[in-house]
Image (tube, grey):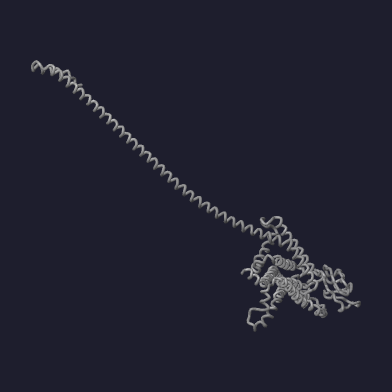
Amino acid sequence: MVSRSIKSLLVLAFSVFLLSAPVVAQHTEEAAPAAHAEASAFDPAKLIMEHIMDAHEFHFFSLGEKHISLPLPVILYSPQRGLSVFSYGKFHHGHEVYEGYKSEEGHIVPVNAAGEHDASITVYDFSLTRNVVQMLIALTILVVLMVGVANKYKKNGAKVAPSGFQNAVEPVITFVRDEVGKPNLGHAYEKYMPYLLTVFFFILINNLLGLIPGSANVTGNIAFTIVLGVISFLVILFSTNKHFWAHIFNPPVPGFVKPILVPVEFLGIFTKPFALIVRLFANMVAGHIVITCFVMLIFIFGAMSKVAGWGFAPVSLAFTIFIYLIEILVAFIQAFIFTNLTAVFIGQSREGAHDEAHH
Amino acid sequence: MELLLPGLGLLFWTLIAFLAVFFILKAFAWQPILSSLKERETGIADAIASADKVKAEMAALKNENETLMAQAREERAQMIKEAKDTADRMVAEAKDKAKSEYDRILADAQQAITQQKNAALTDVKNQVGALVIEVAEKVLSRELANKTEQENYIKSLADTVKLN
């Protein structure tokens, strides 16, 4: 009982430490985006960034000055002003001020009566951005599909051969169970299967939906991967045992090595989830950047001369299709790697218990 | 740089969404799917195990049948042999019995013949004795006249004796 509450305390302390760092950083960096006000004809870097970043609208295309987009709900909470909920469309693409807020380069900032940025007001942005909306759509699809499959199992019983979508899902589930859960977690795998399966399919469906042209890059957003990484971190910490902590704070090495090894081992606790976070984020962002880059190449050449643009189009298209197919593979691989590494880390944190159970 | 800054809204909604999806799927999807898969796998394993068991039982049964058959065959051969022996023995016994009966009958017959022959001889002897006595009586009573008469007389007496 006591060890359990100590464990909970440790988990809380570490997770606050891990979470607070990036959020603090966000506040300090907020002053930067003024310099980006150049109005050049074609800026591929800006376009690519727009493509992979979060936004308050689904932007489909622009005809001259007319933007065809689907504005999404904005939900703001400010300790001074209270809660405001309205559509992003009220800003008219950043040209107007609404309820004391305006949109600056896609960021909603509080303004004073003169229409200037008011730094004295703190605002927490809980808007349903396109990443959020797309994630919710993806998860609705996931839940409907999986519950449907589960109902089929319930209806048909265990003796009937799977059919339809059940057939597609079953090998994936058994793969996660037999290749990820069982080898890494041993006898305790059943306890972790719901978590591992949820992580796997959560990442997979968001990866796949993110590949649809025009959709948001959900898994390539650091906020998304941070949440998954922190949850994995919590699961890993809650799975730890005495053996694990003893190994970190009192490693079995000669006394004079301990001052070096203890900090290294201690940092190791945090590098594991950090690696998970960055790996998924970087892989998905890189894939999206590469694909958009190949498409952009057409327009970069087109800006030089029309002939070059048209001439390069087939080459660019071929590369894009190639990378696209790789990205579909990557969508599965990254979901697998995240799940597998989480299982490996959980397995490591339980290692002693596993041994004790055997002897 | 902005790419590396997590948005508070997305953090919040992702957390809510993940937890919601986790608990929904855990209750309504993973539990039934995993338990069904497990049930099916144990069912298949049981079926294979019982099939193996049945196979082993069948093999044992077959073995048993074969030994039974061999035993039966052996028994049959034994029985045939015994029957043949019995038959042979019976024939031999019958033969022996017949022969002994024949011998006995023969012996009886010979004995009877000897008896009757002896009886007949005794009778002849008795009759001859009687005759001799009768003749001697008559001879003695007539021992008078001459010698020739005497001899004739004996002769006539001898003639009357009919030796049958």
Is B64 displayed left or right of B141 in the figure?
right
Specify whether residue B146 is in view. yes
Is residue B129 depicted above or below B55 in this figure?
Answer: above
Q: Quadrant of residue A187?
A: bottom right
Where residue A273 sits in the image (x, y, percent)? 71, 74
Is residue A344 depicted above or below A158 in this figure?
Answer: below
- Residue located farthest toward the right when viewing the structure as drawn: A113
Q: Residue at x 34, y 35 (%)?
A: B98
Q: Quadrant of residue A234?
A: bottom right
**Observer-nearest residue: A164 or A306?**
A164
Is residue A325 depicted above or below A167 in this figure?
Answer: below
Where residue A66 sits in the image (x, y, percent)? 84, 70
**Observer-nearest residue: A132 or B159?**
B159
Q: Residue at x 59, y 57 (%)?
A: B49
Q: Quadrant of residue A184?
A: bottom right
Quadrant where the C terminus of chain A lies? bottom right
Quadrant where the N terminus of chain A lies? bottom right
**Observer-nearest residue: A81 or A307?**
A81
Specify whether residue A44 is in view. no
**Image label count:** 0
Q: Residue at x 24, y 26 (%)?
A: B119
Where residue A141 sits in the image (x, y, percent)? 75, 63
Where residue A248 sits in the image (x, y, percent)? 67, 77
Is A57 displayed left or right of B120 in the figure?
right
